[in-house]
Image (cartoon, rainbow, N blue to C red):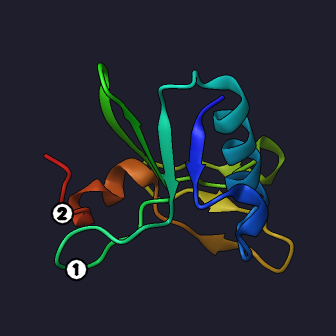
Amino acid sequence: MATVIPSLSTIRGMTPGERRLGQRLESLLEDDYTVWYDIPLGRQRRYPDYIILHPGRGLLFLEVKDWKLDTLKRLPPPATPRFIPSRALKPSAIPWSRRASVPWWP
């Protein structure tokens, strides 16, 4: 069982997808993994959803998106999907097209 910092039971304001992933990371990763949720990084204080550290395997940064197949209406080229959220239809950036805005991305 991985160590999650802070403890998932103390975190408020997580999306359902963030909580679900946190629970899976905590229960399925081995004991030597450390997982941080929503901590600031860099000069611009960016907040990746999860940072996972394994002493022998390195770091992994995760950004959780609560997309479900039934909310995806269409995916026209080049990079603007349309979703059907509970309120109204709205464009949303695809994560891989947002990577340029992340300061630690190569």
Would residue 12 be seen by someone viewing this image from the given angle? yes
Would residue 78 be seen by someone viewing this image from the given angle? no
Q: Quadrant of residue 5?
A: bottom right
Q: Do callouts 2 and 1 mark residues in contact (Cβ within 8 Å)?
A: yes
> Residue 4, position in %: x, y?
59, 48
Callout 2 secondary element = loop
| Residue drawn at 76 percent across, 46 percent down | 20
Up the image or down, 86 lies above or below 55; here it is: below
- Residue 3, which numbered label? none
Q: Disc 1 marks which residue?
A: 44
Quadrant that contains the N terminus: top right
Q: Nearer the viewer, residue 105 or 3?
A: 3
Q: Name the side, left or right, on which 36 lies relative to 72.
A: left
| Residue drawn at 77 percent across, 42 percent down | 69
Up the image or down, 63 lies above or below 93; here it is: above
Identify which amino acid the numbered label 2 is placed on. Pro
> Residue 22, position in %: x, y?
67, 46
| Residue drawn at 25 percent across, 62 percent down | 102
- Residue 103, which numbered label? 2
Callout 1 secondary element = loop
Identify which amino acid the numbered label 1 is placed on. Gln
| Residue drawn at 20 percent across, 70 percent down | 42
Q: Name the side, left or right, on which 96 lies relative to 72.
A: left
- Crowding near the residue tagged with mark 1, few <14, some 14–19, many ≥20 C-alpha atoms within 10 Å: few
Q: Nearer the viewer, residue 14 or 33?
A: 33
> Residue 34, position in %: x, y?
47, 40
